[in-house]
Amino acid sequence: MRPDKPGEGPAVLLGEVRTGLLQHSVELPLSATDRLLGLRHGERVRSSQRPNVQAHSPDLLTGVDCALATGSHRSVRGVGTVTARAVLTEGRVLQASVRARLAAAEGAQRLPWSHYLARPGTVEVIGRAEAPALADGHLTAGPGATLDLGAIAERMLTGIQGGGGLDRRAPFRSRRIRLRWTAVRADLAGEAPGGRLTVEDDTLRTLRLTLDRIDPAEVTAFCEDLALHDWLLSTLGRLIERSGLGSDPGPGPVLKLRPAVNHLMHLWMPGARVARPLAPLWDGLETRPGFSRQWAAAVQRVRDHLALQAVGLHAQPVRKD
Amino acid sequence: MDTTFREVSADPRTASVPLSHLSLEIGHLYMDDFAAGPARLREQFARVKPWADAARAACTAPAGRRPRISTCFLIDDYFTRFSSPAEVVPQLIAEAEACGLTIDYLARESACAETDGCHPARLVESRLVESPPPGTNGSRPPTTATGWLSNGERSPGLDHLLAEAMGGDTGWRPPRETEARRHSVFLDVELWDEQHGRRTWSCPYLAAVWQLLRLGLLRDRGQEVLHPADRPETFPHSWDALPPLVRLNPHADPFAAYRTFSVLASRFLPIEHAVKIVLEQWAPEEPVLAQLAERAGQEGVPLPDDVIARVGYVFHGQP
């Protein structure tokens, strides 16, 4: 990696978003989010109500000094801070989002700590490694001694879910889903701008972005938005599967699907908070695999079932005399 | 046609504060010094004067501009309460003037802990980000010792030693300074203690808060933390009745400054070493940092990124 040039933006951004259901029986009102997300004394919780209700905790920093994976056996040293924040959407879906921008260190030694605190959210790379290799290393790293953004996100989620103010009675069971992501500048990657989303398993997705210019705040917001919608889609799918819709002809599925109607169906709003330069990425995902198409089909299926059940329950059997 | 949309709650503003080039501290007053009488005060100011002049001479402003320098003086009313402002402050002003020094701003040390519903000490605490020892990858929470902050890795505790001894390992490991150059100067700073549920901040910790107030780096929910009050016509008989920060000199340059310089007796050296350890692990707010950098840039004043590099001292000997 070479040092960033002014105005170019960082060469590589690494991140991880963990998304889950807020462990609370009802939607948390905006007035209560100050307490939940006020993770630092003296700093405001940021909230907005257009186009949906979303609140952000202050950014918290964690110091790291460890190996960075490069996708090969060789690793380099990274020293600096990573940024973590929590995002609550519609008082219902909680995300912990951790990111680090990588920058080339000027020397071969670690510097006084105040140097790194003057560059919050930046991890300086000591040693030779190319930007794409560091991005790939982050996406493929297993548990070990290398930088572990996921653990920081997990601690943040656990801390908030276990803190005061929540009754820990979620309306339905769901899984946390991880999105591990990277963004590399296109000129360094030698590729055209674009994204590659991979469903690795039930609870892990990876996203590799290649962009002409990396704005850390915008890219992070995009990844949080994608993680939110991927979680919604996966969670609704699981609710439908577990409801027995399609196999149980009785009223069981209706009862089991009720939480989906009450708590999830109004949350779909892909790209609503995505900056204009990144909008084409969403457009691409809408074409293939077609997030909104799948969501619309699932929602329609639930609604059709509810409608049929309503007709079936209220209609009198027709007598053929 | 283009439309814009903004929600203030989503994008709050950060207040900026007026800034001098240099905040020059010309002394701390503790009960013992005051109890020793006016001669002791005059002796202290006489000792400070040449160094204060040197600091003024060393403060560079852009060509053709007058450097903005404000002086300040801190009185301890946090650890010991002695006398009253009505008795102490006029004496201080007179003795300083007799030595050719002007005290622009007078602050009470308790203001570093709490002032008008704001808790500067807590603001500072919430932004401490501990320096990670090598091998820290985020997988474990930082090994914090509640109420303490060090510049490295501590020696293993007794429990750990016993466990190791059972396993046949030989015990003690020395502490290690993270930024040691071969040999360590390890320091562990007590930030506060608690008795009967009441927290008392330590002297070096409040001294670190004092530095950050002078550097104009603290904000409470984006707002200024310590705004100077005008000098009252008469000084009150209780410290609580004195505003936390008083502008004694109505023509003074702003209280906060790009850089600080403190002229202190050498007995304060350990305290200020502890201050350095706190400041080195304090993460400034990005918007505030950017604000200061932008203004320094507009003025053509060099300003280091690192907060600790903005802090300077002279330690003088005692008679």
Image (tube, coloured by chain):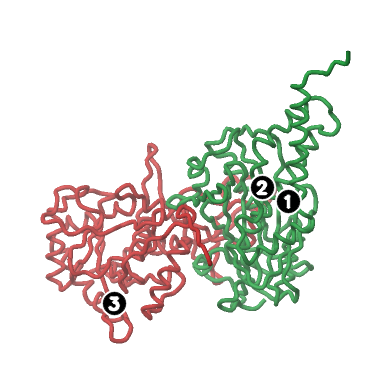
Residue at 25% x, 74% y: name it.
Answer: B52
Q: Quadrant of the N terminus of chain A?
A: bottom right
Callout 2 amino acid: Trp
Residue drawn at x 62%, y 37% as measured from the top left: A23
Farthest residue, direction bottom: B63
Precedes in sequence: disc 2 or disc 1:
2
Disc 3 + disc 1, Cβ < 8 Å: no
How many numbered badges does the structure rendering display? 3
Q: Is residue A161 left or right of residue A48?
A: right
Tag 1: residue type?
Ser
Q: Residue furthest front?
A: A321
Q: Position of residue B109 (x, y in %)?
A: 29, 55
* Residue linked to disc 2: A268
The CA distance from mark 2 to mark 3 is 62 Å
- Measured as percent of width and height from the top left, residue A34 is found at 48, 45
Q: Please report contact status of discs 2 and 1: CB closer than 8 Å, yes or no.
A: yes
Dividing the picture into quadrants, the one containing residue B20 is bottom left
Disc 3 chain ID = B
Which residue is under mark 3?
B55
Give the mark toward the camera: 2 or 3: 2
Inter-mark Cα distance, 2 to 1: 8 Å
Disc 1: which chain? A
Q: Nearer the viewer, residue A40 or A144?
A: A40
Q: CA distance from mark 3 to mark 1?
A: 66 Å
Kindly identify which numbered label has been placed on residue B4: none
Q: Which chain is green?
A: A
The label number, if any, that marks residue A292 in the structure image: 1
